[in-house]
Amino acid sequence: MSRLFTLKLPDPCPLRMPRKELAEALTLAGYQTTPTTVANWPLDWILINGRQTASTEEAFEYAQLKIDEEHERLLNKRGRRYTFNRIRAEGAGNAA
């Protein structure tokens, strides 16, 4: 499977980030999201100093997975549409 693009971890990359900072880092890397959306992701959240934090690498990996899935879905959708249009065009040519 080809990748549309690859998210790059921030430099320096903190081990864990609160969800607001995580959403901002993902947005800066090219994956626009909100803290509310990130909070609903299946990440291992740990409470540190009263703030929920998640692994930065795990969050970026999950975002990359979502990008790859959406890219694959769009490729499949375009492929089906192309095949359907090609078959329909060939069928119309045979009927004439």
Image (cartoon, rainbow, N blue to C red):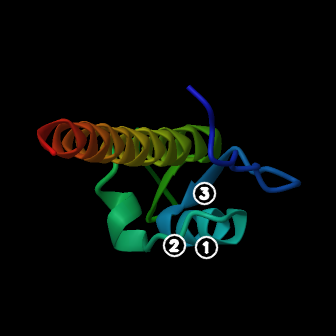
Please name the residue that numbered disc 1 is placed on.
24
- Please state which amino acid type lies under the numbered disc 2: Lys
Q: Tell whether 10 sits left or right of 46.
A: right
Q: Is residue 51 above or below residue 4?
A: below
| Image point (17%, 38%), residue name | 91
* Alpha carbon distance from label 1 to label 2: 6 Å
Please name the residue that numbered disc 2 is placed on.
20
Q: Tell whether 57 sits left or right of 72.
A: right
Q: Position of residue 18 (x, y in %)?
A: 53, 63
The label nearer to you, 1 versus 2, is: 1
Please name the residue that numbered disc 3 is placed on.
17
Upstream in sequence: badge 3 or badge 1: 3
**Cβ atoms at labels 1 and 2 below 8 Å apart:** yes
For this orientation, the residue located farthest to the top is 1
The foreground one among 49 and 44 is 44
Q: Is residue 9 above or below residue 95?
A: below
